[in-house]
Image: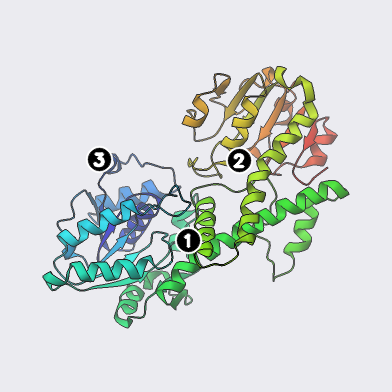
Amino acid sequence: MNITIIGTGYVGLVTGACFADLGNHVSCIDVDRQKLRNIKNLSIPFYEPGLKEIISRNIKESRIQFTHSYSDISESDLIFLCIDTPQGKNGRPDLTNLNSCIDLIVKNLNQSMVIVIKSTVPIGTNAKLLNRLNRDLKKKNVKVSMCANPEFLKEGSAVNDFLRPDRIILGSKDQKVLNLLKALYKPLNRKSNKIIEMTIESAELTKYASNAFLASKISFMNNMAHLAEEVGANIHEIRHGMGADPRIGKDFLYAGIGYGGSCFPKDIKALIEVEKSFGIDPSLLLAVEKINKDQVRFFVKKLLKVYKKNISKKNLLIWGLSFKPNTDDIRDSVAIEVISQLAIKVDKIYIYDPLIKTLPKKLQFFKNIFVNRTQYSNINSTHALVILTEWKQFWDPDLKKLTGLQDMQIFDGRNILDSKTLHDHGFKYHGVGIL
């Protein structure tokens, strides 16, 4: 098929590259010309394992192209909208970029078209856009059909998630539209039927509900971690005991410093605002959000409790800046929030992240934060290690090198280290929900 992808952010670029790799001809549109030039030169704007290789392969095979122009969108079999919808000032998604995109579609579309929305949009947005498009295109005798096809891509494994999906949500009542999308996704749907058909509204809410539920599991476990510390329990043991129940499942039961990233915080806020607009009590999601915000304070308090009045003389080695491993994404990174709170308390902070080699803007204000080029740099000048992102290379550290820590203190914000092993080697270990 001939596919147009509008937006070359995380979702758009992964979607376009993977569809091209399945044999389709893909045109990726973005108004940012410099970004497009960079992509053509294989300078990808974010890190995602395997993505650069796929884009390179499909550029060579002439199956993917990049343009800023909307002039050829009428030649497509369907159009995917992968426009960013950042959080607005009122907590609801900002649809400015999406509306600008719709303006350009109205101006350039000259034949009837199926438009698929992958962007995470407020419930009811698909229907509103469909009405607007058909109203504005009526004079051209052009009719648009719409499908909500939310993405479920995890940063760090997005290519694999796209090519091996656990579900493909198609929101539409139009059978012709559904048949077209089924044909497109057929290569990903051969071994078992992963396609779930539903209404547009259900598809929109499924995306929000999925993220809200996962965020709720994280906040629940962090809440249990507080109680575990008070009663002398171990959150690892609790997680194993809970996760063995198939009704609960073992995923997202990890206590730590909380969730971050571009999806969970934004989607929780958006769903809270939707519930308020319908007069529904948002207490559950408000609690999820509050627990997550409080988790940073809870973790920082651990360090302050250990050092008390001596904290201003201490230097810290911090591992991790990205909001999760296998990505260079620092949007709403909890790590940055923790570092911001610690920087005003301590003497110096040295940070190491496998992918991020410059300080984020939020941390550039501090003159006592420095970026390490290697994992163990400046270890002999620091008093404690603080782990904020669970990169795999942090899971099994060189204990001999760690003995360079002047106070032999380790604060593990992701519970990835073995407390017994560290205690046996003379370290003082502080996890979340672990004594």
- Between 67 and 259, the one lying in front of the other is 259
Q: Are marks 3 and 1 in contact (CB under 8 Å)?
A: no
Residue visible at 29% across and 53% down?
58
- Between 401 and 367, the one lying in front of the other is 367
- Is 250 on the left or on the right of 96, as rendered? right
Q: Position of residue 140 (x, y in %)?
A: 12, 70
- Is 426 on the left or on the right of 402, as rendered? right
Report the amino acid beneath label 1. Phe
Q: Position of residue 433 (x, y in %)?
A: 78, 47
If the image is split into quadrants, where does the C terminus sit?
top right
Considering only order in the chain, which callout, 1 or 3, is on the residue closer to the N terminus? 3
- Between 142 and 32, the one lying in front of the other is 142
The answer to whether residue 257 is seen in the rendering is no
Q: CA distance from mark 1 to mark 2?
A: 22 Å
Q: Residues within 10 Å of mark 1 (few under 14, many from 20)?
A: some
Q: Where is mark 2, residue-wise?
A: 389
Residue visible at 49% across and 25% down?
364
Report the amino acid beneath label 3. Arg
Q: Where is mark 1, residue-wise?
A: 152
Q: Position of residue 340 (x, y in %)?
A: 59, 31
Asked which quadrant contains residue 34, the reply is top left
SS assignment at label 1? loop
Q: Which mark is residue 37?
A: 3
Q: Residues within 10 Å of mark 2 (few under 14, many from 20)?
A: many
Q: CA distance from mark 2 to mark 3?
A: 32 Å
In the current view of this chain or complex, which residue is farthest to the right? 231
